Image: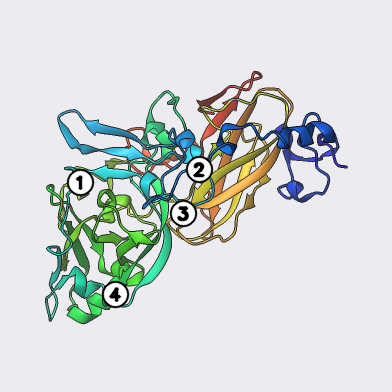
Amino acid sequence: MTRQSDLQTVAGGGLLDRRVFLKKGLVFSIAALTSESLLASINDHHLPWMQKPGDTFSNYGQPSPHERKTIRWTMANRDASGNGVSWTPLHDLEGTITPNGLHFERHHNGVPQIDPKQHQLLIHGSVKTPLLFDMDALLHYPMTSTFCFIECGGNSNAGWRDKPIQTVAGYFHGMASCSEWTGIPLRILLDEVEVKSQAKWIIAEGADASIMNVSIPLEKAKDDCILAIYQNGERIRPENGYPLRLIVPGWEGVLNVKWLRRLHISNKPTMSRNETSKYTELLPSGKARQFTFVMEAKSIITRPSYGYKLDNKGLYQISGLAWSGRGKIIKVEVSADGGKTWAEAELQEPVLAKCFTRFRIPWNWNGDKAILKSRAIDETGYVQPERNELISKTGKHSYFHYNAIVSWEVSNTGKISHVYT
């Protein structure tokens, strides 16, 4: 039998080899119950749900009433209730796929209630054959599925503040979610309209009241973009773009235009509000960065994190998420001593490009103060930066693309807080 005291650490602060949970005879419990007490417990037939038939069928499944605390936290503009955001509760979830009802939202003028029989998609501009599609026509095209994350460019932007925000992981980093999206590869329709040689951009426009529009390089549109009709197997929900959404894997969430109604093919970007007054930031050099597009490698420990409390010394599993807009995550390293030493975490299969990757590593907490960190490394060799490294590169007045390493401090009482190191 393997006991916690026999486990060998591979990094400071009590981090253990990522495969330690595969060992036979590993003891997690503080004290084993006797066979008689176990049998007495399972033979208790007086529990209320064992005394009468259960509920009948429902037309659409709902979470248990005991799990209704797992919700999106929403924040709307006081002067325009349709303008706001809701965060995915990453700290309450496991695995890599976000349930449809918990996928984050960002709206600029509310959620349009669109009749799919009246919705159309126009592709025009620098093309030989402009075409107009209704939803029935689009449903006849060959479809494909892709697993990918969508992350708002402004996700985690509280990290730019001088003082670390104290809130749960999902309400700090939860403008990121991951789904299986199913729809038509955009290149099929672009081939059908015959894009002219001088074209370099597509300008995507939504059917919401803000008439949201953004520019996307034509090369990316032909690569891996899809016109999504389904999310996680069901038709996309209204708040996530029903009946048609553009999916731009690995790039800023704002480009994944919801309620898609028009694709204008052009030789230049439109230079809309979200490409000039927004998503353009001044660098320390005095130059501005624009059209940054790619969401760089990032990771966050979701358990344990702020809001959790460690009740006892002993063995815990550290769990979190990593992702990169450039491709696959190839490694996640975890530190329990504030970054002095690192250990490699186990990556949950399958590890997919531009998709959430779940990582886990065992940790033997001795009751002393500890600082937990994770850093992601993607297949291009990019390493998630420390906060001071990111700020030295981009400046302290940024708002978008915050992907610095996050530090959780565990006190000797087991309380967890967000700190800068």
Q: Mark 1: which amino acid?
A: Val
User: Which callout, 2 or 3, points at the residue further toward the start of the chain?
Assistant: 2
Q: Is residue 41 left or right of residue 78?
A: right
Q: Determine which of the numbered discs, if any, sits on residue 111 in the image.
A: 1
Q: Residue sitting at 24 percent across and 55 percent down?
A: 258
Please tell me whether mark 1 sits on a helix, a strand or a loop.
loop
C-alpha gap between disc 2 and disc 1 = 37 Å
C-alpha gap between disc 4 and disc 2 = 50 Å
Residue 184: x %, y % from top left = 30, 71
User: Which callout, 4 or 3, points at the residue further toward the start of the chain?
Assistant: 4
Question: Label 4 crowding class (10 Å Cα cut-off): few <14, some 14-19, many 20+?
Answer: some
Q: Mark 2: which amino acid?
A: Gly
Quadrant holding the N terminus: top right
Q: Determine which of the numbered discs, if any, sits on residue 163 in the image.
A: none
Asked whether the viewer can see residue 32, the reply is no
* Residue carrying label 3: 324
Asked whether the viewer can see residue 324, the reply is yes
Q: Marks 1 and 4: CB-CB under 8 Å? A: no
Please tell me whether mark 4 sits on a helix, a strand or a loop.
helix
Residue 101: x %, y % from top left = 36, 46
256 over 86 or under it: above or below: below
C-alpha gap between disc 1 and disc 3 = 29 Å
* Residue carrying label 2: 54
Q: Nearer the viewer, mark 4 or mark 2?
A: 2
Question: Label 1 crowding class (10 Å Cα cut-off): few <14, some 14-19, many 20+?
Answer: many
